[in-house]
Image: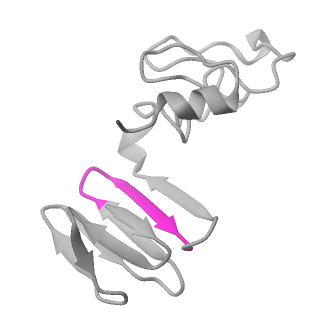
Amino acid sequence: VVAQGRNVSVNGAAVLEGHPYLHRGLGVTWPGEWVAVASSLGVRVAWDGHLAVTVTVEPELRGGTWGLCGTYTDDPAGKCHLPGATPTPPGDCLPTLPVPPDDFVSPDGDVAPFAASFGNTWKVP
């Protein structure tokens, strides 16, 4: 799915603005001024066509996600463990870090030191 402003395409085919699209577990809808894409995998992304984006995942994915939106672990101390690791007790977090340790986990499992380097690790080739 590619979106630029209110122009949306799926696999190169344009989706007409305001017209819902559903094919093979992927849906595109137009709630108000937003464009929303939902997959049968349990992930929904909504975009206002400018700067605001929301990502919603189903509860079944709790603890099984990572990437640009974090790990969805509900760790009250700010997500202090990496995917697949044993949760760290809240008092054991590194309070001096400006970002919780698992917020910048790259696809290879390393923790990137900066937001820009983290974002660049998730670029689609």
Instruction: Tell me the residue at 29%/70% (across/down).
Output: 9
Residue 72 percent coordinates (x, y): 53, 37
- 15 left or right, relative to 83: left
Residue 115 percent coordinates (x, y): 68, 32
Is residue 16 positioned above or below 88 on the image?
below
Is residue 10 positioned above or below 104 on the image?
below
Q: Is residue 52 visible?
A: yes
- 8 left or right, relative to 46: left
Name the foreground residue: 77 vs 20: 20
Instruction: Tell me the residue at 59%/16% (across/down).
Output: 111
Q: How is the image coloured?
A: one colour
Q: Which residues are magenta?
A: 39-48
Q: Is residue 73 visible?
A: no
Is 42 colored magenta in this rendering? Answer: yes
Name the foreground residue: 66 vs 86: 66
What secondary structure do most residues of the magenta stretch adopt?
strand
Instruction: Tell me the residue at 70%/25% (across/down).
Output: 114
- 58 left or right, relative to 50: left
Is residue 55 positioned above or below 35 on the image?
above
Instruction: Tell me the residue at 71%/24% (across/down).
Output: 100
State how many labels appear. Answer: 0
